[in-house]
Image (tube, rainbow, N blue to C red):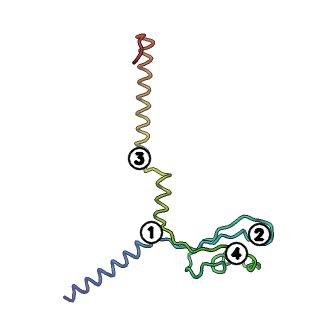
Amino acid sequence: MHSAAMFSALLIIVASFTIHDTEALYEDVRCKCVCPNPNVVNGSSSDRKLYIANVAPNLCNCDNVILPELPANFSKSREFCPLCECKFESRNTTTIKDELSGRMAQPLYEQGSVLNRVGNRQDRWKRQVQEQRNNIYVRRTMLN
């Protein structure tokens, strides 16, 4: 009886680790900040820059994501940070990867079969053309 309880507890622990690892494969959390180029504070540029970091939702802000990426001598953070927009996102990366790869890439075995079908149709077309030439120029008949 004691071993059955230990086995059940061990099974629950293993299952919880498996579920936790499986969730990690499908979920991706990140902090995404969109800011102007730091040179915009100086008035020399207006293009935007993307900063992405893995931080906790409460740390998804300019101070924790963007400022550590800027040079140490950057002194205009009070002017720069209000120009940034930071959002915490939770995404299903498996779905995103499936959508991207499903439209762009075919498996190699499918590429080979497509090439084989095209080649077979081309060969059939060449035979039909040759047969038409023989009927018209040699036999002087037309195909119906």
Mark positioned earlier in the residue sequence (4 or 2):
2
**Badge 3: how crowded within 10 Å, few (<14), some, or many (20+)?**
few
The label shown at residue 26 is 1
Amino acid type, label 1: Tyr
Q: Residue at x 33, y 77 (%)?
A: 15
Query: Can you identify the residue that label 2 sits on?
Result: 40
* In this rendering, position of residue 28 left or right of residue 1: right
Describe the element under mark 1 as helix, strand or loop. helix
Mark positioned earlier in the residue sequence (4 or 3):
4
Image quarter of the C terminus = top left
Amino acid type, label 4: Leu
Mark positioned earlier in the residue sequence (3 or 2):
2
Q: Residue at x 43, y 18 (%)?
A: 132
Q: Position of residue 114 (x, y in %)?
A: 43, 41
Q: Position of residue 78 (x, y in %)?
A: 74, 80
Amino acid type, label 2: Val
**Badge 2: how crowded within 10 Å, few (<14), some, or many (20+)?**
some
Q: Position of residue 18 (x, y in %)?
A: 36, 75
Image quarter of the N terminus = bottom left
Where 59 sits versus 134, above or below? below
Where 93 sits versus 14, above or below? above
Point out the frontmost of discs 4 and 2. Answer: 2
Describe the element under mark 3 as helix, strand or loop. helix
Mark positioned earlier in the residue sequence (4 or 1):
1
Number of numbered discs overlaid on the protein picture: 4
Point out the frontmost of discs 3 and 1. Answer: 1
Query: Can you identify the residue that label 3 sits on?
Result: 110
Query: Can you identify the residue that label 4 sits on?
Result: 70
Distance from the alpha carbon under mark 4 to that under mark 3: 47 Å
Distance from the alpha carbon under mark 3 to that under mark 1: 27 Å
Mark positioned earlier in the residue sequence (2 or 1):
1
